[in-house]
Image: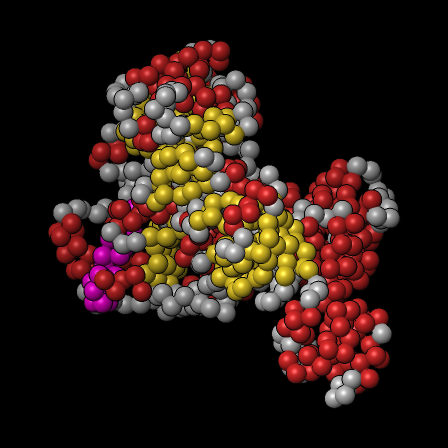
């Protein structure tokens, strides 16, 4: 329900670059429901193009409870009240807004012109010449400043009239200020390139309603950029061919434009440096620059002379004795290279000891540098793409690990990293786990935030699902054969006895060995028809009803269909957490959330230290607040961010990356169609630590194992790296 409060802005608590503001506000008047707040000072938050102390404002919005800052007034729109009383006008004119107008001059002006002072300054400024001591320069300052002060509101009103919401109008004005209407008139699509918070489709619909023609060149050029961006993000590509761009652009615009018209607009974008062409590859400028940064940094690190720590082999032997472990030749080489090389990739499948190697690398670095364990955090950054992967790394290595977003200090409001090319981290060694999940943009952002000679070690299994965003960085680096690479293939003894791990390797080789299933207690199959999959999952869930269901995970390729995530979540909730008079619950759309429900985080919220893929338990529900416990980190959700989570009994295989679970239930049926492919089921299988149930049709699993064509991405780090290394004279394979 909308409320309004009227009063004065007192001071800022936080101010973002995009006009986002958290501040204090003293209430003088309010709607009937909030009369009790008159005289109180409250916290408010919203988007403002300009806000000044001493001014009176009417704020429209609602009171909400923020997970970190408590109760706030969330502003949807606002208006500034021009001062009406003489004392208020004096205070306004002498507030510092009008340069050179102090309290004495302001008092003279108001004494002479009265309550109509501001209107007279705007409409008949020459009247100010009648006031003793007021100079032409003062009149110019008063008139021009007041005109600009009021013009901003006219611009926002004009944007609202175009069809933009108030928040969008403020974002636009804060970006362009007095150039706003000029830019809207010249090319409304510039907003899409400059302001991420406003969707292209919204801008396009407003353009078409405001005299833009469907075949306007400005629209065609903007649509080409939009299509490149959307297709690359949806399919993981870094570039598209000219033919692809033409096809998708025509489909988006819903008409088949002449090829010559299309090519003319592509050429204009090339001239404007908004896209980049290399052979028949067309890149968005940002993605092209990201790929080139990665290639050039890897080339530079590969060119640096190896370090040569004394008695390295002896120290590795002593580490084996201390940890009571014996490394195989591949593991020993990886540990040795980690201390010598400036760029290293360590890859291997499940059970090959990748995380064990990371611990050895950290321990040996500590021993060689002799800086003490407590100082390692200033020397080494342990990173992972997800919160759960970072947590697992912390537990295994004994040193605090971070998500890459958290390490780079991502700012939610500005959507920028605070650790960047202008403010670099001083760590000397960066180790990145789960490297297959890193996209081109995130890896490039990390490189920008590191010194050029910072040592980098990437650890991962490139047979797993690639990153959600564009690129396949780990795969391209490995396949270039131009980097320092150690491939771990030897299995630990306990891993070699695992039917789960055997199944993973079989899937990766396009095989399904039926004899592995039900041969032991770790790999179990329930072969049933598609219509009976839910019933079989229900039986398994019931057998785990009283266990810790946080470590029991159902992994599903799709959200919809009878055997999809949504249906399975409803079924699992009834078993693990049925309705009870002792548990509060709340309905969000057609989903009921109740206390003790398992929850999956859907996006990064670094300000609350919770990240995409994290799993928690609803601790309590208070009115419209849902408080979720993520391993001791309690995060509050209000209706404004209910879309940030969902039930987590069943989750997608993509969301499970970087996580491990004691027990995994993996349904597989022909109904999953295009989601039956090798990397997806390989990744799903490798999430299980102790127990894996495969439910459905093993022939469908075989179909998935044979399907390795689903995820062919258009990337060029591999080719670029081969080319630059060849040009530098390094033609040998590493």
As drawn, 577 above or below 12: above
Residue 368, image x, y percentages? 22, 65
| Residue 610 location (% of width, % of height) | 41, 46
Q: How many marks?
A: 0
Q: Residue at x 49, y 43 (%)?
A: 603
Q: Name the residue located 71 percent from the left edge and 43 percent from the top edge.
A: 201
Task: Determine whether 595 is above or below 170 in the image.
Answer: above
Residues 156 and 692: in front is 156
Give the vertical position of 360 relative to 551 (above or below): below
- Residue 18 in percent (x, y) is at 60, 59
The colour scheme used here is secondary structure
Instruction: Give the main secondary structure, helix, strand or loop, of the magenta stretch.
Output: helix
Residue 500 shows in this picture:
no
Q: Is residue 366 magenta?
A: yes
Q: Is residue 305 visible?
A: yes
Q: Position of residue 179 (x, y in %)?
A: 75, 65
Q: Nearer the viewer, residue 223 or 114?
A: 114
Q: Is residue 727 magenta?
A: no
Please give the name of the residue rendered at 61% of the width and 48% of the height, measured from the top-left corner.
Answer: 4
Q: Would residue 627 be found to the left or right of residue 467 on screen?
A: left
Look at the image and tell me in which quarter the C terminus lies. Answer: bottom left
Residue 475 relative to residue 243: left or right: left
**In the depicted structure, whether residue 686 falls above or below residue 696:** below
Q: Quadrant of the N terminus?
A: top right
Magenta stretch, residue numbers: 354-373
């Amino acid at each position: 329900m909308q409320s309004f409060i009227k009063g004065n802005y007192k001071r800022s608590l936080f101010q973002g670059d995009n006009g986002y503001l958290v501040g204090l506000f003293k209430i003088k008047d309010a709607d009937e429901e909030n009369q009790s707040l008159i005289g109180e000072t409250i916290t408010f938050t919203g988007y403002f193009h300009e806000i000044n102390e001493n001014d009176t404002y009417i704020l429209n919005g609602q009171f909400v409870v923020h997970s970190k800052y408590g109760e706030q007034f969330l502003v949807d729109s606002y208006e500034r009240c021009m001062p009406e009383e003489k004392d208020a006008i004096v205070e306004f004119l002498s507030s510092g807004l009008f340069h050179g107008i102090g309290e004495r001059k302001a008092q003279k002006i108001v004494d002479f012109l009265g309550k109509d002072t501001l209107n007279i300054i705007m409409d008949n400024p020459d009247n100010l010449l009648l006031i003793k001591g007021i100079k032409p320069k003062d009149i110019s300052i008063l008139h021009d400043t007041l005109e600009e002060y009021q013009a901003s509101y006219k611009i926002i009103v004009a944007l609202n009239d175009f069809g933009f919401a108030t928040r969008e109008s403020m974002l636009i004005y804060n970006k362009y200020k007095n150039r706003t209407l000029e830019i809207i008139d010249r090319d409304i699509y510039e907003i899409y390139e400059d302001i991420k918070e406003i969707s292209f489709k919204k801008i396009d619909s407003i353009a078409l309603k405001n005299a833009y023609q469907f075949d306007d060149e400005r629209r065609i050029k903007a649509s080409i950029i939009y299509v490149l961006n959307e297709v690359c993000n949806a399919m993981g590509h870094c570039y598209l061919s000219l033919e692809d761009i033409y096809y998708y652009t025509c489909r988006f615009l819903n008409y088949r434009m002449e090829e010559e018209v299309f090519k003319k607009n592509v050429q204009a974008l090339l001239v404007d440096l908004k896209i980049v062409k290399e052979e028949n590859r067309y890149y968005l400028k940002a993605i092209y620059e990201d790929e080139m940064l990665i290639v050039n940094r890897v080339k530079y690190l590969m060119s640096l002379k190896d370090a040569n720590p004394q008695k390295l082999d002896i120290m590795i032997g002593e580490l084996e004795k201390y940890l009571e472990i014996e490394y195989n030749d591949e593991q020993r080489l990886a540990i040795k290279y980690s201390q010598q090389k400036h760029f290293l990739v360590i890859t291997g499948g499940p059970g090959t000891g990748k995380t064990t190697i990371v611990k050895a690398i950290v321990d040996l670095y500590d021993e060689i540098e002799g800086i003490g364990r407590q100082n390692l955090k200033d020397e080494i950054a342990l990173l992972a793409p997800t919160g759960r992967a970072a947590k697992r790394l912390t537990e295994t290595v004994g040193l605090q690990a971070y998500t890459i977003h958290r390490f780079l200090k991502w700012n939610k409001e500005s959507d920028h990293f605070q650790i960047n090319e202008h403010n670099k981290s001083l760590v000397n060694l960066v180790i990145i786990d789960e490297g297959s999940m890193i996209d081109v943009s995130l890896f490039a952002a990390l490189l920008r935030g590191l010194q050029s000679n910072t040592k980098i070690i990437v650890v991962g299994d490139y047979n797993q699902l690639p990153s959600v965003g564009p690129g396949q960085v780990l795969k391209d680096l490995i396949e270039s054969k131009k980097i320092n690479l150690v491939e771990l293939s030897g299995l630990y003894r306990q891993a070699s006895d695992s039917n789960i791990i055997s199944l993973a390797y079989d899937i990766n080789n396009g095989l399904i060995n039926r004899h592995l299933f039900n041969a032991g207690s770790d790999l179990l199959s329930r072969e049933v028809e598609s219509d009976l999959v839910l019933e079989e999952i229900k039986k398994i869930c019931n057998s785990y009803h009283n266990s810790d269901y946080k470590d029991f995970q159902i992994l599903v390729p799709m959200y919809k269909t009878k055997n999809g995530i949504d249906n399975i979540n409803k079924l699992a909730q009834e078993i693990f957490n049925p309705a009870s008079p002792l548990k509060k619950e709340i309905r969000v759309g057609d989903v009921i959330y109740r206390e003790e429900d398992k929850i999956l985080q859907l996006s990064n919220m670094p300000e609350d230290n919770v990240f995409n893929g994290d799993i928690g338990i609803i601790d309590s529900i208070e009115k419209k607040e849902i408080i979720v416990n993520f391993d001791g980190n309690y995060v509050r959700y209000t209706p404004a961010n209910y879309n940030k989570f969902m039930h987590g009994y069943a989750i997608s295989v993509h969301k499970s990356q970087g996580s491990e679970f004691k027990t995994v239930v993996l349904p597989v049926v022909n109904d999953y169609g295009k989601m039956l492919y090798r990397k997806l089921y390989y990744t799903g299988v490798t999430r299980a630590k102790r127990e894996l149930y495969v439910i459905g049709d093993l022939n469908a699993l075989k179909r998935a194992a044979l399907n390795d064509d689903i995820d062919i991405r258009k990337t060029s780090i591999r080719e670029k790296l081969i080319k630059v290394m060849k040009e530098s004279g390094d033609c040998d394979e590493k």
